């Protein structure tokens, strides 16, 4: 074999290995990627079209927090226009309460509820993640509750 042919084989093998490594990384990360959605985004797309893990952000709807017979925390996330029912089978964060900002990460079940594997509550009275603020502001501009779109502080 000539040196030129050897180099071409070496470059081809390196390209194939790199492509395989990237493909394995993408397949491995598919289940860990979670895109942010607001309740209005979910209502527009429909729950049936959301098969992957997602993050839903908004405010915990007042009067919606209950506990199931199995001890699960049941609540609704709202952006002032639409709501998303959530079930969480773990201990909620200390700052979790009705009317406050929350982000829940999980997948939808066959009944249309978000089965959260993680719930994040805001860390102080004034902070709201930018994505949550933007979603609440869009909902308020489209005719929702005007009190939900307060300006965040960082």
Image (spheres, helix red, strand yellow):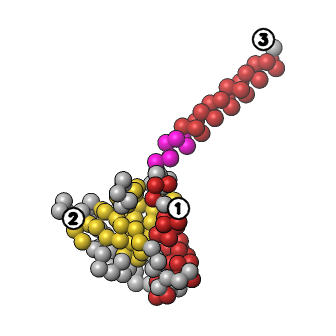
Give me the residue at 45% from left, 62% from top. Answer: 55
Q: Please name whichever residue, 54 or 90, is drawn nearer the observer in this view of the structure.
A: 54
Q: Quadrant of residue 65?
A: bottom left
Magenta: predominant secondary structure element?
Answer: helix
Tell us which disc is closer to us: 3 or 2.
2
* Residue at horizontal 71 percent and vertical 26 percent from the top: 12
Confirm whether residue 137 shows in the render. no
Label 3: how many Cα within 10 Å (few below 14, some 14–19, many 20+)? few
Q: Is residue 117 magenta?
A: no
Near mark 2 (Cα within 10 A), the count class, few <14, some 14-19 or many ≥20, is: few
Residue pointed to by mark 3: 1
Q: Earlier in the sequence, mark 3 or mark 2?
A: 3
**What numbered label is drawn on residue 45?**
1
Q: If you read the primary sequence from the N terminus, does the residue marked by circle 3 or circle 1 appear first? A: 3
| Residue bearing mark 2 | 68
CA gap between label 3 and label 2 equals: 72 Å
- Cα distance in 3D space between marks 1 and 2: 28 Å
Report the front residue among 145 and 20: 145
Query: Magenta residues, as a range?
Result: 25-32
Q: Residues within 10 Å of mark 1 (few under 14, many from 20)?
A: few
Q: Is residue 56 above or below residue 60?
A: above
Residue 29 in magenta stretch: yes
Which circle's residue, 1 or 2, is located before the other in the chain? 1
Please, is residue 138 above or below residue 93 in the view? Answer: below
Secondary element at image label 2: loop
- Cα distance in 3D space between marks 3 and 1: 58 Å
Give percent across and percent down for residue 140: 52, 82
Looking at the image, which residue sits at the far bottom? 147
Estimate the x, y position of residue 146 in percent, counting from the top left: 49, 87
């Amino acid at each position: 074999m000539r040196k030129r042919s050897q180099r071409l084989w070496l470059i081809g093998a390196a390209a194939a290995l790199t492509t395989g490594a990237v493909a394995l990384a993408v397949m491995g990360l598919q289940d860990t990627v979670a895109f942010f959605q607001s309740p209005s985004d979910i209502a527009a797309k429909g729950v049936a079209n959301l098969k992957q893990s997602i993050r839903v952000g908004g405010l915990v709807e007042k009067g919606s927090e209950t506990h199931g017979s199995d001890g699960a925390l049941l609540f609704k996330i709202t952006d002032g226009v639409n709501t998303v029912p959530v079930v969480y089978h773990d201990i909620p964060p200390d700052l979790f309460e009705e009317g406050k900002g929350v982000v829940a990460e999980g997948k939808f079940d066959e009944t249309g509820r978000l089965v959260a594997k993680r719930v994040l509550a805001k860390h102080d009275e004034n902070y709201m993640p930018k994505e949550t603020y933007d979603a609440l502001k869009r909902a308020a501009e489209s005719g929702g509750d005007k009190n939900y779109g307060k300006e965040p502080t960082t």
